[in-house]
Amino acid sequence: MSKGAKGAKGAKLAYRPIGLAAGLLAGAVSGAVFKQVWKRISDEEDAPDALQSEYPMWEIIVSAALQGAIFAATKAAIDRLGAEGFTKLTGAWPGD
């Protein structure tokens, strides 16, 4: 194994706890963002749950799709910022 490959593997391993924390942060941030977005577009406090029979199917699907999109975008942004910060501190990119 080359020295560069060992360094990349070490960077990935060292970044793992940071990535885990970033994932938790992304979940919390995206949940709060989704709640505010849903409140504004639906005039309701909470999004519908899949097992709540009083909501039509389309509303459940739109809610879930929006929540997933917000989570994915938030997670990508936080992961990228974490990786850039890690690189500035260590000089190694954690994702390659």
Image (spheres, grey):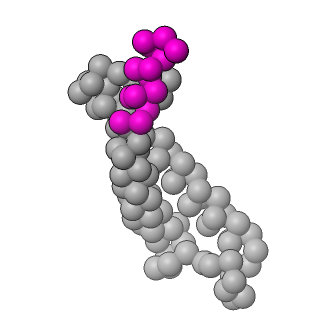
Which residue is depicted at the point 29% across and 32% down?
85
Which residue is depicted at the point 36% across and 36% down?
14
- Name the foreground residue: 94 vs 70: 94
Residue lying farthest front?
1
- Name the foreground residue: 38 vs 31: 31
For the image, the number of numbered tags is: 0
Residue 7 magenta-drawn? yes
The kind of secondary structure the magenta stretch mainly shows is: helix
In this view, 74 is above or below 8: below
Which residue is depicted at the point 36% across and 46% down?
17
Please say whether residue 47 is visible from this viewpoint: yes
Give the magenta range.
1-14
Q: Quadrant of residue 12?
A: top left
In this view, 31 is above or below 17: below
Q: Position of residue 94 (x, y in %)?
A: 42, 29
Q: Position of residue 43 (x, y in %)?
A: 49, 76
Q: Position of residue 92 (x, y in %)?
A: 35, 21
Residue 90 magenta-drawn? no
In this view, 67 is above or below 95: below
> Would you say 40 lies left or right of 49 here?
left
